[in-house]
Amino acid sequence: MTDLFEAEVTTTTSLDMRRLQRQKRRATRRRWTLVAASVALVLLAIGGSIAYNFVQSFEAPESDVAADYEGAGQGLITVVVEQGDTGADIAQTLYDAGVVASTDAFIAEARSNPEAASITPGYYYMQREMKAEYALQALLDPASRNELSLTIIEGRTVDSTLQAIANLTNATLEDVEAVAANTDALGLPEEADGNLEGWLFPSTYTFNPDVQPADILAQMVETTITVLDRNDVPEGDRQEILTIASIIEREARLPDDRPMVSGVIQNRLDIDMKLEMDSTVKYISPSEGVYTSDEERAIDSPYNTYMYAGLPPGPIAAPGEASIKAAVSPAEHDYLFFVTVNTDTGETLYAETYDEHLGNVAIGQEWAREKAAQAEESEEATD
């Protein structure tokens, strides 16, 4: 009986041990499940935390009734929202400037409006003594932004762009030129060889009112690099692509002509044929009209593509992205010549042979004569 009892005791103990082990395993699984769930919640929270945390930075007001103004305010002032400001920082800035009656009123309004998370750094026109609701609306209204706007159109040269920057910032042209000379500080890539031409991307830019010429130029260079990267232009090809694109920008009038003109340029380069582009001559000898004179085509300059084969030393203007795309992907054809036969519409004709080209040139000359005759008749009728 002793053996039976011991056996019975041993069996019971084994069952208990297995029961305990199962309980421990369940407890372990529960702990890991809780850990995994916690990690998942943390990752989810990180993903949505940017806007949420900004709104939450508008801490809840200490009292239910916060001091607030009633009207839309009076007296125009400028308020600055700094980069990295929290909601509480913005509320304090508005209070210190006399815009809102209390930080609590603005915080309460912001916490009730999810769009408050979209407030961006910058300068804002505000009124003193504004109701918190109106103050928030002003910060969310793009029309309230105090910004400078600069538009550089495609085909502009560096000289005209520097003058536009001087006009915008009220700096002297000489000061802007001095800033532009320090191309390393502007982030100009080495392959540009210190020449900003073609690297100041044409676009519309907005800046804070205290922007400096160096900041503007650096952003334009950075934008050019971004566009080149977006179009998969290798660093070693950037200068060549910008040079071709700048010629396209000055030669092509219509979107469909950009890749066509690019194809002509590539075809000529492939057979070492002179480009003979009026636009490159105009770069060294600016004059009225799109065509060059015999005297201009006789100028001895590496930019004179009537005199020298190959591409000029660098870009002749600021090309837009459409021209950059055309330079990267020229149209495949056998044309070696093109001429714009109607400068009003931009109509351009292409030819494979010089004789065909001469026929197209004659069409363009006839149109020019008719245009001149119409202008003369109009002038006589006015007199």
Image (tube, grey):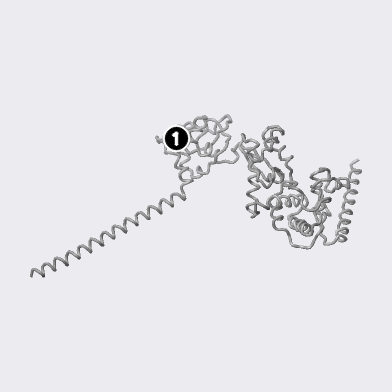
Which of the 4 image quarters holds residue 64?
Answer: top left
Q: Quadrant of the C terminus?
A: top right
* Label 1 Cα crowd, 10 Å radius (few <14 / some 14-19 / many 20+): many
Q: Residue at x 31, y 57 (%)?
A: 30
Observer able to see residue 162? yes
Amino acid type at circle 1 is Asp
Taking depth in this image into account, of 231 and 152 the one nearest to the observer is: 231
Helix, strand, or loop for circle 1?
helix
**Picture coordinates of residue 169 (x, y %)?**
67, 34
Viewed as shown, does residue 126 lie left or right of 303?
left
Taking depth in this image into account, of 105 and 146 the one nearest to the observer is: 146
Viewed as shown, does residue 43 lie left or right of 264?
left
Q: Quadrant of the N terminus?
A: bottom left
Q: Residue at x 51, y 39 (%)?
A: 84
Residue topped by disc 1: 104
Taking depth in this image into account, of 117 and 5 the one nearest to the observer is: 5
Viewed as shown, does residue 31 lie left or right of 51?
left
**Picture coordinates of residue 126 (x, y %)?**
56, 34
**Picture coordinates of residue 376 (x, y %)?**
90, 45
Which of the 4 image quarters holds residue 160?
Answer: top right
- Which residue is situated farthest in the left direction here? 1
Observer able to see residue 202? no
Q: Residue at x 45, y 40 (%)?
A: 57
**Picture coordinates of residue 267 (x, y %)?**
77, 59
Viewed as shown, does residue 46 lie left or right of 338?
left
Taking depth in this image into account, of 365 and 313 the one nearest to the observer is: 313
Give the vertical position of 178 relative to 345 (above or below). Answer: above
Number of numbered discs overlaid on the protein picture: 1
